[in-house]
């Protein structure tokens, strides 16, 4: 155990496919999505997973674990630890995630012009690389 009270092994155990804790988290998440849908306030979700397996270990997230019924899923050409690290806006992974965010924002905003949204995103006000004005979307990586 480390200073936070959790060791890496504790976290790995919780994330095992047969974990009761993981099953409970997934159930509550799906229930939350259902409630939002029933209130006509749907949450849009897209799942991403790594394409490159970790050396000597293989893929960290199994294909079936990186999908949710009724929501799109995709891959990013990176290892699990590199899936959310993009060296530039030209990076293919960045393009996939930002493109999906633009698609989801367009759905939420009633079909806003994609070119205008992209211009807005590219000219956004950032603090430590994070857009200070955009509301959270759920993109599962």
Image (cartoon, rainbow, N blue to C red):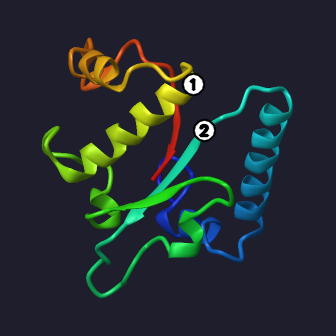
Q: Residue at x 34, y 39 (%)?
A: 99
Q: Is residue 109 above or below residue 49?
A: above
Q: Is residue 6 above or below residue 61?
A: above
- Report which residue position mark 2 lands on: 44
Q: Nearer the viewer, residue 96 or 83?
A: 96
Q: Residue at x 58, y 44 (%)?
A: 45
**Residue 24: x percent and y percent?**
79, 57
- Disc 1 element: helix
Q: Residue at x 26, y 51 (%)?
A: 93
Residue 122 is drawn in which quadrant? top left
Residue 83 is drawn in which quadrant? bottom left
Left or right: where 64 falls relative to 56? right
- Report which residue position mark 1 lands on: 108
* Residue contact at pointers 2 and 1, CB within 8 angstroms: yes
Mark 1 or mark 2, which is nearer the start of the sequence? 2
**Residue 44: x percent and y percent?**
60, 38
């Amino acid at each position: 155990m480390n200073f936070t009270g959790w060791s890496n092994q504790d976290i790995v155990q919780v994330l095992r496919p047969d974990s009761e804790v993981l099953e409970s988290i997934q159930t509550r998440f799906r229930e939350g999505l259902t409630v939002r849908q029933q209130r006509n306030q749907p949450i849009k979700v897209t799942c991403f997973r790594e394409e490159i397996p970790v050396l000597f270990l293989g893929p960290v997230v199994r294909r079936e674990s990186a999908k949710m019924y009724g929501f799109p899923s995709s891959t990013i050409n990176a290892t699990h630890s590199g899936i959310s690290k993009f060296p530039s806006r030209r990076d293919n992974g960045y393009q996939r995630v930002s493109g999906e965010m633009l698609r989801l924002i367009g759905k939420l905003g009633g079909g806003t012009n994609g070119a205008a949204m992209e211009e807005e995103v590219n000219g956004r006000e950032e603090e430590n690389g994070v857009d200070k004005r955009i509301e959270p979307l759920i993109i599962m990586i």
